[in-house]
Image: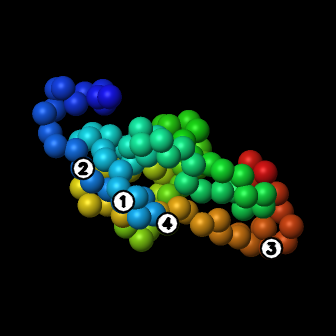
């Protein structure tokens, strides 16, 4: 299986790790695209009900694809360009002040 554009770039794929699993990405691919191409479609869960989330809009409008990149949580996987050696991990749900007061959480639950 070839990725779109791989014939044009001639570049070697990048090696990323996601929760200890090696994932490859091509130059120009986003982290989200690389994960989906590797068959990983969910990398966070919603705060209240633990529902899986991954790419939804794919253009940075929503926040369903949040991921931790090189120790920095809350990154939108669809907007972060893949780089060789990146360390990716699931973004753990964080409670906001509104969640503590019983608010709606506004993440789709």
**What distance separates the C-alpha of mark 3 from that of mark 1?**
33 Å
Query: Which badge, 4 or 2, is on the more N-terminal residue?
Result: 2
Residue 52 pos. (x, y %): 66, 50
Query: Would you place residue 17 above or below residue 23 in this image?
Result: below
**Labels 4, 2: front one:** 2
Q: Which residue is mark 2?
A: 14
Residue 77 horizontal side relative to residue 47, left or right: left
The residue sitting at the left extreme is 10
**What distance separates the C-alpha of mark 2 from that of mark 1?**
10 Å
Q: Which residue is mark 3?
A: 100
**What distance separates the C-alpha of mark 3 from that of mark 4?**
20 Å
Residue 20, by quadrant, is: bottom left
SS for dot 2: strand
Q: Residue at x 72, y 52 (%)?
A: 51
Q: Which residue is mark 1?
A: 17
| Nearest the eye: 22 or 82 | 22
């Amino acid at each position: 299986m070839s990725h779109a554009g791989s014939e044009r770039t001639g570049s070697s794929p990048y090696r990323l790790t996601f929760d200890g699993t090696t994932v490859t990405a091509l130059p120009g691919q986003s982290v989200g695209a690389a994960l989906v191409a590797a068959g990983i479609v969910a990398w966070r869960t919603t705060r209240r009900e633990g529902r899986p989330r991954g790419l939804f809009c794919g253009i940075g409008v929503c926040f369903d694809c949040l991921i931790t990149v090189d120790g920095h949580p809350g990154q939108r996987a669809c907007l972060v360009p893949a780089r060789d050696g990146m360390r990716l991990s699931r973004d753990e749900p964080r409670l906001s002040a509104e969640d503590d007061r019983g608010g709606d959480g506004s993440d789709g639950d």
